[in-house]
């Protein structure tokens, strides 16, 4: 037992003013105030290594697979043949790691904060290993700017961002979804993480409405993520093509199954009401 | 602000040795060591009133509807015409409150701990209101004994118990499911809460195997419950009849929809592997 473990130190993330999820930490591996945000990496007793940005848990070694499988494979399996993938955010490499399980030509990660990538490469090899794949290209820069200036086009675009407060704010604005169009191949599928439907169903609903203004077929889906607020998370997938049924899974997974991919689109009554309201 | 709220007091439930979900409490309304367990009722800042048994959150005012709708309506809507319902446990009244939304003749609640019922009637009217319905009958006593001695038969039996440590231990044993048969009408449907598939997938898997030894059609389903460990919970439904598709929902709900009832049976790969292992 190292001194920190003996000292019984806990990290707490407040989900609102009256609820917090707390993790016993056995090591504080990395801590830096970067140009964009505060970055911490902890070794936790129960969830292995944990990445925290501005005090909010982004991923843990033990449950990241649920978030990343759901963010990546659902849109990719709703595209007939995704070859070129763009990830906005996702500097930890987790989304890229899942994307390369498909028959892709390239996966471009546009991360605003180089320090997140550096820290991930040093402490989070279970996601950052994606950068070893020659098809994965890292671009350090602002996602909105990249979209405005890029001459490339993509089949799938994944917005793997922090919540709409802080560096990711612009990624949740309506203009961003409009601008995205210029980098999309015909039939492209876009997916974003859309927050906690329990604590911020209004944010989920707002993103849904904004995407509906820009895209023809827009669908919300959910996943249970143990280390996220309320353990319940939302994603939104959008396309100008009519997305049919997903193609079957042909690679190994730990969370999704063909059934899970269908079941995830069943939304609770309270969220349907938030979407109407 | 009352003195307790000002004092900034938090209740913590450890989900394992390195994770705890904590709630700011504004009042400690009830506390008693009954003959069976420790009972606490808190007023929380974020989730309203909260019932805690032996340190484990059983329900909160704000999210109990998810657990109770899923425990009750899924089995009841898989039965063609449930008229007589037996609830083992559920002294808070939450399951009975949902059961009476159906065209039932009687709902019998068999609760081992009279103090739970008394406390619920005083502090948890949002669930205990069920006892005002003339179709709801309360029997204080041991669930196993009741099953062994009852001359009645039921169309739906719901095991709304605490976890398999403490007073509910016997409700998770294989013999219990065998004995249940004597109180079942032909075509009856049974459902149990089966723990956290994330933290105790082995418990979920064991209950599934035991029910399979006694029943012909056995199905696991899941729900996200914000105040339960990992926010992910499992239930198991079993019958000797082949259960088809659920009947459509004809009453008002806050969580389930016809789609949710279908989607809930899609199980994550890691749980499927626990079931095989």
Image (cartoon, coloured by chain):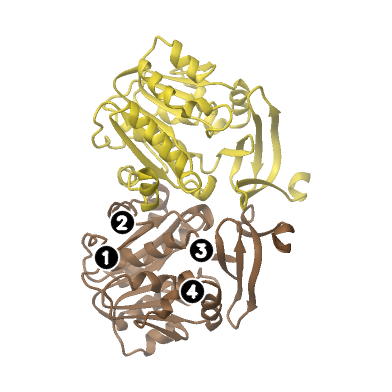
Chain colours: A brown, B yellow
Local SS, label 3: loop
Give x and y (percent) for residue A90.
45, 74
Out of B133 and A12, give the one closest to the viewer. A12
Query: Do the residues indicated by labels 2 and 1 lie within the same chain of the protein?
Result: yes
Q: Residue at x 53, y 57 (%)?
A: A227
Give the chain of mark 1. Answer: A
Decide: few, some or many residues near mark 2? Use Cα within 10 Å; few <14, some 14-19, many ≥20: many
Q: CA distance from mark 4 to mark 2?
A: 24 Å
Which of the chains bears the disc numbered 3? A
Q: Which mark is residue A261?
A: 2
Q: CA distance from mark 3 to mark 2?
A: 23 Å
User: Badge 4 sits on which subunit?
Assistant: A
Cα separation, mark 4 vs mark 3, equals 11 Å
| Residue A28 at x, y percent in the picture | 66, 68
Relative vertical location of residue A145 with respect to residue B156 in this rendering, above or below: below
Number of numbered labels in the structure image: 4
Q: Which residue is mark 4?
A: A92
Q: Are marks 4 and 2 in contact (CB under 8 Å)?
A: no
Lower sequence index among marks 3 and 1 = 3
Chain of the residue that carries numbered disc 2 in the rendered image: A
Numbered tag placed on residue A156 in the rendering = none
Q: Same chain, marks 4 and 3?
A: yes
Residue B190 visible in the displayed image: yes
Image marks 2 and 1: residues in contact by CB distance under 8 Å: yes
Image coordinates of residue A193 in percent, x first then y, are: 42, 66
The label shown at residue A77 is 1
Of the numbered discs 4 and 2, the one sitting upstream in the chain is 4
Do callouts 1 and 4 mark residues in contact (Cβ within 8 Å)?
A: no
Q: What residue sits right under mark 3 in the picture?
A: A61
- Report crowding for label 1: few under 14, some 14 to 19, many 20 or more residues within 10 A (C-alpha): many
């Amino acid at each position: 037992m190292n001194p920190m473990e003996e000292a019984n130190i806990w990290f707490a993330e407040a989900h609102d003013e009256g609820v917090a999820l707390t993790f016993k930490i056995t090591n504080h591996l990395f801590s830096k105030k970067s140009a964009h945000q505060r970055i911490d990496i902890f070794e936790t007793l129960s969830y292995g290594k944990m990445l925290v940005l501005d005090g909010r848990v982004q991923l843990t070694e033990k449950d990241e697979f649920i978030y990343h499988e759901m963010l990546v494979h659902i849109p990719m399996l709703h595209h007939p043949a995704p070859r070129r993938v763009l990830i906005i955010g996702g500097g930890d490499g987790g989304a890229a790691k899942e994307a390369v399980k498909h028959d892709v030509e390239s996966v471009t990660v546009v991360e605003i904060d180089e320090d997140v990538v550096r820290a991930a490469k040093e402490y989070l090899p279970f996601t950052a290993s994606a950068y070893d794949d020659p098809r994965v290209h890292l671009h350090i820069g602002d996602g909105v700017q990249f979209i405005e200036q890029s001459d490339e086009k993509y089949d799938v675009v994944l917005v793997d961002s922090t919540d709409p407060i802080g560096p990711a704010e612009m990624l949740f604005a309506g203009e961003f979804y409009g601008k995205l169009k210029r980098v999309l191949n015909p039939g492209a599928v876009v997916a974003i993480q859309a927050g906690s439907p329990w604590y911020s169903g209004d944010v989920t609903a707002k993103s849904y409405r904004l995407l509906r203004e820009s895209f023809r077929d827009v669908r919300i889906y959910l996943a249970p993520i143990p280390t996220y607020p309320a353990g319940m998370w939302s994603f939104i997938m959008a396309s100008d093509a009519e997305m049919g049924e997903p193609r079957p899974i042909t690679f190994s997974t730990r969370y999704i199954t063909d059934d899970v991919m269908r079941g995830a689109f069943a939304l609770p009554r309270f969220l349907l009401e938030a979407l109407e309201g």
